[in-house]
Image (cartoon, helix red, strand yellow):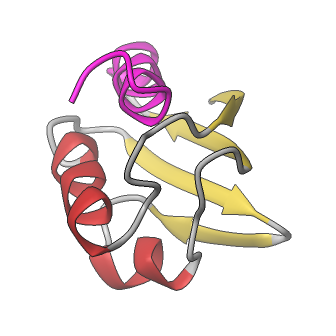
Amino acid sequence: MMKATVTINMDQGAGARPAAMLVQVANRYNSSLYIESENKKVNLKSIMGVMSLSLDNGAEVIVQAEGGDEEQALSGVENFLTGIVS
């Protein structure tokens, strides 16, 4: 299992469209992926879970990955959240 603390750096924050895009990124990987914000932890492959966090630009979250491709999964999600890739 791998974890990373990430500060969200996306111009549009994490509304419905960016949340859907984040779930699409998470679903590229076989690993289990979770995101935690303010003591609430949700499955990154669940659109309803991600939207329930109401993440804003500048928010700090913890991303957790576990599985065969956890390193790539964590990196991919981290890159998306920090605006490196879309």
Outermost residue toward the right in this view: 39
Q: Residue at x 43, y 24 (%)?
A: 70
Residue 19 higher or lower than 24, as above or below? below
* Quadrant of residue 7 within the rendered picture: top right
Q: How many marks?
A: 0
59 left or right of 84 in image:
right
Image coords of residue 52 (percent x, y): 52, 85
In the rendered view of the protein, which quadrant contains the C terminus? top left
At which x and y percent is residue 23?
Answer: 26, 57
Inspect the magenta stretch and tell me whether residue 38 lies in it.
Answer: no
Asked which quadrant contains residue 28, the reply is top left
- The residue at the point 22 percent across, 35 percent down is 29
Above or below: residue 55 compared with residue 67: below
Query: Which residue appears at 34% of the width and 23% of the height?
Result: 76
Q: Is residue 80 magenta?
A: yes
Q: Is residue 10 above or below residue 73?
A: below
Residue at 41% from the left image edge and 42% from the top image edge: 11
Q: Quadrant of the N terminus?
A: top right
Judge left or right: residue 75 versus residue 54: left
Position in image of residue 81 (x %, y %): 46, 36
Q: Nearer the viewer, residue 20 or 41?
A: 20
Quarter residue 39 falls in: bottom right
Report whether 40 appears left or right of 38.
Answer: left
Q: Residue 62 placed where, x, y %? A: 71, 44
**Magenta extent:** 68-86
- Viewed as shown, does residue 21 lie left or right of 50? left
Does the magenta stretch mainly form a helix, a strand or a loop? helix
